[in-house]
Image: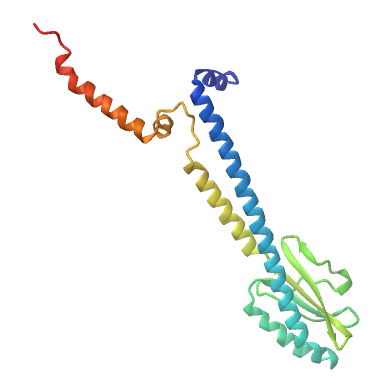
């Protein structure tokens, strides 16, 4: 089994071996370039998701300062219900000044809300396939509490799957086959070579009636 590729390699001409090396080099360069583009795209999307979530947390914090100041958890709960318009938000929570849960929200189908019981237990960042964010709520320099948001990363996973699908589709289309195949040889010819080859075949067919000796 191990000797089969070597035997096939020995049967190739020098030109075919050079073609194989060039095609493999191009394929490797394309894979590296696609991987780099995919990594940059994912990093940009992660940063965009984080920025959007931080903006949402800031807006929630600015609208809960009065409720936190007057100890009105009902108003905070009504505000958090507005997150149903944000399907990417799995859970949200407002912590009071003491770090304990003041009001919480969980997306439908994700109940009860999986939020830490205290703000001190929260770790911000991309954790467990989710973006966890803890944003401080302040009013005129006075600390009032925290906004906790847990966002899913379905958009990121969809982008990755789509990019990998594109790479998997484009790779076979590059036709990186063995240069020893007839198709590869035909594709590697210059158009003028194809024209000259077809002309030579036509000339030989025309000459066939005269190939026989005269009797």
Give the farthest residue toward the top: 215
Above or below, comparing residue 194 to residue 151 in the picture: above
Say which quarter of the image contains residue 46.
bottom right
Give the farthest residue toward the bottom: 70
Image coords of residue 51 (percent x, y): 71, 71
Whether residue 135 appears in this view of the structure is yes
- The answer to whether 119 appears left or right of 49 in the picture is right
Residue at (47, 29) in percent of width and height: 179
Above or below, comparing residue 75 to residue 201 in the picture: below
- The answer to whether 36 appears left or right of 179 in the picture is right
- Report the number of numbered marks: 0
Quarter of the figure that contains the N terminus: top right
- The answer to whether 193 appears left or right of 84 in the picture is left
Image coords of residue 117 (percent x, y): 85, 73
Above or below, comparing residue 110 to residue 38 in the picture: below
Residue at (75, 78) in percent of width and height: 57
Whether residue 118 appears in this view of the structure is no
Residue at (47, 43) in percent of width and height: 173
Quarter of the figure that contains the C terminus: top left
Give the farthest residue toward the left: 215
Closer to the camera in the image, 192 or 159 = 192
Image coords of residue 12 (percent x, y): 50, 21
Image coords of residue 92 (percent x, y): 75, 76
């Amino acid at each position: 089994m191990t000797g089969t590729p070597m035997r096939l390699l020995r049967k190739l001409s020098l030109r075919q071996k050079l073609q194989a090396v060039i095609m493999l080099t191009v394929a490797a360069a394309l894979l590296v370039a696609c991987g780099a583009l995919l990594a940059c795209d994912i990093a940009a999307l992660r940063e965009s998701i984080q920025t959007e979530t931080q903006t949402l947390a800031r807006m929630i914090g600015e609208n809960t300062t009065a409720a936190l100041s007057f100890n009105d958890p009902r108003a905070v709960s009504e505000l958090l219900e507005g997150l149903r318009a944000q399907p990417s938000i799995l859970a949200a929570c407002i912590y009071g000044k003491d770090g304990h849960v003041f009001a919480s929200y969980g997306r439908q189908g994700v109940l009860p809300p999986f939020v830490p019981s205290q703000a001190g237990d929260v770790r911000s960042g991309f954790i467990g396939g989710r973006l966890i964010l803890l944003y401080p709520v302040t009013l005129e320099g006075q600390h009032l509490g925290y906004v906790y948001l847990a966002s899913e990363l379905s958009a990121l996973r969809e982008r990755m799957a789509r990019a990998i699908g594109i790479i998997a589709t484009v790779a076979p289309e590059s036709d990186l086959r063995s240069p020893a195949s007839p198709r590869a040889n035909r594709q590697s010819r210059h158009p003028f070579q194809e024209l000259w080859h077809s002309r030579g075949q036509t000339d030989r067919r025309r000459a066939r009636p005269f190939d026989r000796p005269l009797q």
